[in-house]
């Protein structure tokens, strides 16, 4: 097929794109699904088998999926120029017998493919019908001339690569096949083929202008009346008509009407109307066709350099969303989409960018209904033609100024526009992703502006190429640092600023997110952004033993590959929320609550919603236990701030008190249950009592200074310290041994994806060695009046050599006070963390703590965590990041208990809050595993008690380091203390 390698030949006999409105005529079913089982022939096989449609060829046993990011899939295999196709170009042939419904006789017959990757060649009864490219928009053809009575054979050849594949270099799995719906359809004698509905608003006068541009087609010359109705629920609010319109083969009609005070659509108030367009025979008055489309009245504009929705400044609290399912790839079901939309709404998101292609039609309907702002993106990315190993090299970039590619990208724009244009949720058109710049993209932007003047144009690529700066109506950037954003916004900017990608959510990440959110109040022209990204692109695979696991790039033998760079989601591939969502939900809330001892202040940052739509819940806790609960309904309009008086009687008892104020849902909603939390604020204060004297030795402690060990024995316990192995060796209480291995200082964490990306393991490697290979220089025993001290001086194999001192003070009651001290050295690198690791018997797997929670948190990702008492298990605490890595940490702990099923175990407490994690594996075991199934069978519980751990970072995952204020400085003195006791 010569057209496979010709960028100018991207469609043959494909009918023009059109809107996706519903139409009804009589009792006829105008649509016949062809989803289901098709016959299938893969490449040169001579045996026809079966395949499921929709579905990917590679996930049904034919070939392998391949994951690459920037590089093209054939890089390193063939030297190809843009437009050329690999010699090894897998293909599959689909075949299905169909019968045309009797109701469709004498009517035109069409076939629609909603998504085929990357191209299709269509035959009907052995005749070539046509050809089409563009994976993510519909390809439709007329079959009328090829249809015969009885059974008809539809045959489709799908090749994996075509010239258009050079325009589809998105960061995703490379699949092929028919992966969206396929159906036959027909039309009545007179048919509304296309409608473009715009709803201009005069916000000052409260008047909406409903404009309907209709493209009609008729199989014969006919006069018709057009009746247009606008319906709100079951109430008709507007009706107007045009009569005696002569329709020949085709005609375009424009009708408009004003409506007073329409209900406005926004993400907060997604008010929809049903538009009915009724085509009526002018003579017989018979209804020919009824067309239905849900619409919304809203106004998107850039005014005074600010992006507005219905006159209010819009701030995107968004995420980039790939269509993905861990079993089916980019074949997403209605159930998947419903889960996604409900999850986004329940977690305070207001926007989605369709990265980087038009989505399934149902997704836009859900965004209309539930209320999500959408940046809809053309299926265009040519990243690998201009950015090599992270450096710009635009010599061979496409489409650039090359006229050979212009019609192709304009066609992709038109297909997206016609399919999606009537959705009020779509607030901007995006020209695609990471395709540099040039004249063609500018022409593309002008093309869309001419089609639609009601939405601005988005394109990030002008940041890299300023030749045609007017291509984009906004300044859009990826992974810009906070200081770079501020620099732009402080230097007389000309366009509102949007982060189309930021806070890279790869593995244990999304630290520093609060710094971006804080820009919202500092700069009016900062208009939020879209986290990368929503869901891990991991595919279910089985081990040799038949165990399912989530696989990433390279796991299918795919080469070249970009390995685990496909798993950057806030949501795991199996649609479970990761712990990172705790932070995002709190920071993305439209409502900010600040609490003090006597008052609380609510800042209502929503655009249109009074907080009287929610409950305000006030709670008081003493030492983590709730002692007061009150619900109020308060009045505070959008964009207002108000201080409210607390009416709480604080007990006179000493202790730590928490005043917590929450907003919760007043009733069940489609996406959330009644009483679910929206946001919260806390104020923490203490009433201190006079400190008790440390208990005297009311029972004798026995010191046993042996040749190899030091024993401290009290009533019902025996603690052993090793001289030869250098550390606490045994905690034996009531005859039970709690330790599995010797206790040692620890300065290392299992590297996160961000750590690997910024080469933390290379920069800080000596701290891993120090954790593994420290030696005891000397041991000191001190007998005090109240306790016995065992003091270890560890020499650390660092450059220069350093030391840390761990002192165990054993009391007669069985408590052990532990002090760890490091003196610091000006020549030392930063330290990943500072603490100690206890390996306990694995039966101690239940965790209860009074600290920050409930989900894991870190010093740079703690805004979504609360102070309280929480419980979990070591197994649940092992976060499911695709590659095992540092996880499960909690900061600000007053105490933590690690217990078995009988409720006995170890309690750690501190006068100064500390950090901890408790996991089924040690740091070094976690770091060795590339998948969870490769972790060993748990044999102990790793309890990590830390003074502090460096932040996880998250500006990006390929070089950005943890921010300086969230580092642990090796040049400084560090000391902390905690107490161990048996419970």
Image (cartoon, rainbow, N blue to C red):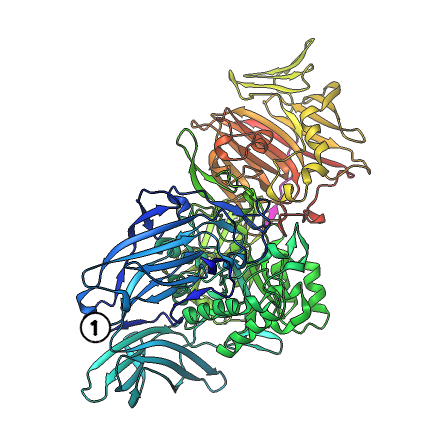
**Residue 606 visible in the displayed image:** no
Q: Is residue 807 above or below residue 272?
A: above
Q: Which residue is mark 1?
A: 106
Estimate the x, y position of residue 43 in percent, counting from the top left.
Answer: 40, 46
Q: Quadrant of residue 787?
A: top right
Q: Is residue 439 left or right of residue 554?
A: right
Residue 198 rendering spot, x and y as whole percentages: 43, 79
Report the number of discs: 1
Residue 251: x and y in percent read 35, 84
- Quadrant position of residue 468: bottom right
Direction bottom: furthest residue: 244
Q: Residue at x 29, y 52 (%)?
A: 36
Point out the stretch of residues depicted in magenta. Answer: 684-693
Q: Residue at x 51, y 30 (%)?
A: 935
Q: Check the image and report above or below for 313 versus 391.
A: below
Helix, strand or loop: magenta stretch: loop
- Using the image as rendered, state which of residue 904 and residue 144 is in the foreground: 144
Of residues 642 and 639, which is closer to you in this image? 639
């Amino acid at each position: 097929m010569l057209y496979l390698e010709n960028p100018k030949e991207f469609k043959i006999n494909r009918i023009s794109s059109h809107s996706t409105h519903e139409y009804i005529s009589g009792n006829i079913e105008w649509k016949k699904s062809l989803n289901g089982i098709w016959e299938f022939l893969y490449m040169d096989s001579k045996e026809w088998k079966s395949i499921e449609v929709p579905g990917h060829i590679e996930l049904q046993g034919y070939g392998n999926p391949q994951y690459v990011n920037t590089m093209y899939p054939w890089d390193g295999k063939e030297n190809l120029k843009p437009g050329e196709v690999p010699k090894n170009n897998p293909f599959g042939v689909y075949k299905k017998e169909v019968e045309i419904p009797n109701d469709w006789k004498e009517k035109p017959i069409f076939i629609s493919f909603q998504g085929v990757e990357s191209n299709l060649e269509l035959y009907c009864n052995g005749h070539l019908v046509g050809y089409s490219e563009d994976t993510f928009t519909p390809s439709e053809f007329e079959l009328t001339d090829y249809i015969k009575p009885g059974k008809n054979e539809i045959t489709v050849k799908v090749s994996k690569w075509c010239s258009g594949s050079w325009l589809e270099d998105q960061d995703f799995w490379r699949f092929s096949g028919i992966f969206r719906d396929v159906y036959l359809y027909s039309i009545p004698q007179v048919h509304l083929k296309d409608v473009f509905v715009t709803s201009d608003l005069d916000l000052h006068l409260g008047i909406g202008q409903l404009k309907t541009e209709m493209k009609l087609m008729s199989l014969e010359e006919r006069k018709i009346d057009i009746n247009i109705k606008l319906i709100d629920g079951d109430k008709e609010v507007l009706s107007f008509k045009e009569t005696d319109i002569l329709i020949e083969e085709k005609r375009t009609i424009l009708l408009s009407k004003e409506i007073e005070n329409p209900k406005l659509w926004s993400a907060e108030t997604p008010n929809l109307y049903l538009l009915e367009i009724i085509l009526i025979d002018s003579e017989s008055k018979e209804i020919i066709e009824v067309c239905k489309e849900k619409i919304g009245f809203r106004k998107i504009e850039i005014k005074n350099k600010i992006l507005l929705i219905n006159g209010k400044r819009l701030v995107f609290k968004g995420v980039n969303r790939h269509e993905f399912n861990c079993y089916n790839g980019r074949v997403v079901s209605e159930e998947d989409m419903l889960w996604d939309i409900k999850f986004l709404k329940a977690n305070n998101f207001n926007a989605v960018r369709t990265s980087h292609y038009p989505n399934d039609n149902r997704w836009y309907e859900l965004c209309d209904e539930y209320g999500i702002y959408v940046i809809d993106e053309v299926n265009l990315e040519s990243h690998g033609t201009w950015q090599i190993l992270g450096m710009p090299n635009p010599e061979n970039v496409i489409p650039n100024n090359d006229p050979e590619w212009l019609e192709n990208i304009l066609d992709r724009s038109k297909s997206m526009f016609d399919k999606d244009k009537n959705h009020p949720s779509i607030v901007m058109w995006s020209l695609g992703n990471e395709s540099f710049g040039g004249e063609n993209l500018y022409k593309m932007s002008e093309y869309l502006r001419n089609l639609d003047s009601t939405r601005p144009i988005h394109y990030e690529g002008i940041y890299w190429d300023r030749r045609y700066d007017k291509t984009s109506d906004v300044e859009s950037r990826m992974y810009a640092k906070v200081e770079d954003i501020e620099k732009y916004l402080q230097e007389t900017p000309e366009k509102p600023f949007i982060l189309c990608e930021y806070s890279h959510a790869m593995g244990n990440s999304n630290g520093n997110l609060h710094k971006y959110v804080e820009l919202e109040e500092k700069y009016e022209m900062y208009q939020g952004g879209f986290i990368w990204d929503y869901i891990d692109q991991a595919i279910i695979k089985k081990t040799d033993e038949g165990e399912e696991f989530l696989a990433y790039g390279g796991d299918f033998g795919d080469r070249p590959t970009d390995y685990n760079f496909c798993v950057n989601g806030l949501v795991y591939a199996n649609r479970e929320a990761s712990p990172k969502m705790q932070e995002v939900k709190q920071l993305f809330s439209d409502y900010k609550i600040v609490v003090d001892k006597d008052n609380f202040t609510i800042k209502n940052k929503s655009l249109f919603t009074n907080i009287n739509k929610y409950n305000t819940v006030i709670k008081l806790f003493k030492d983590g236990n709730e002692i007061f609960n009150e619900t109020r309904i308060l009045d505070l309009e959008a964009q207002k701030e108000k201080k409210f008086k607390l009416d709480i009687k604080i007990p006179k008892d000493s202790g730590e008190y928490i005043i917590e104020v929450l907003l919760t849902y007043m009733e069940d909603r489609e996406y959330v249950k009644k009483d679910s939390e929206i946001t919260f604020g806390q104020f923490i204060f203490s009433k201190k009592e006079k400190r008790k004297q440390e208990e005297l030795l009311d029972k004798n402690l026995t010191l046993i200074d042996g040749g190899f060990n030091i024993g401290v024995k009290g009533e019902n316990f025996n603690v052993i310290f090793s001289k030869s192995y250098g550390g606490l060796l045994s905690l034996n209480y009531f005859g039970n041994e709690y330790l599995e291995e010797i206790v040692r200082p620890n300065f290392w964490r299992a590297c996160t994806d961000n750590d690997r990306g910024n080469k933390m393991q290379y920069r800080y490697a000596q701290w891993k060695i120090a954790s593994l290979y420290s030696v005891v220089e000397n041991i000191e025993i001190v007998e005090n009046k109240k306790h016995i001290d065992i003091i270890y001086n560890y020499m650390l194999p660092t450059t220069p050599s350093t030391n840390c001192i761990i002192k165990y003070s054993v009391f007669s009651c069985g408590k052990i006070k532990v002090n760890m001290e490091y003196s610091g050295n000006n020549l030392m690198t930063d330290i990943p963390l500072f603490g100690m690791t206890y390996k306990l018997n694995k039966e101690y797997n239940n965790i209860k703590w009074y600290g920050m929670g409930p989900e894991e948190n870190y010093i740079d990702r703690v805004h979504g965590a609360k102070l309280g008492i929480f419980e979990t298990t070591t197994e649940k605490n092992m976060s499911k990041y695709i590659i095992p890595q540092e996880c499960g940490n909690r900061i600000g702990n007053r105490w933590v208990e690690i217990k078995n099923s009988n409720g006995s175990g170890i309690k750690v407490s501190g006068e100064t809050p500390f950090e901890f994690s408790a996991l089924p594996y040690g740091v070094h075991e976690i770091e060795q595993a590339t998948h969870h199934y490769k972790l060993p069978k748990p044999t102990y519980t790793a309890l990590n008690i830390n003074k502090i751990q460096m932040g996880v970072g998250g500006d990006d995952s390929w070089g950005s380091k943890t921010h300086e204020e969230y580092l642990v400085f090796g040049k400084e003195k560090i000391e902390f203390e905690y107490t161990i006791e048996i419970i």
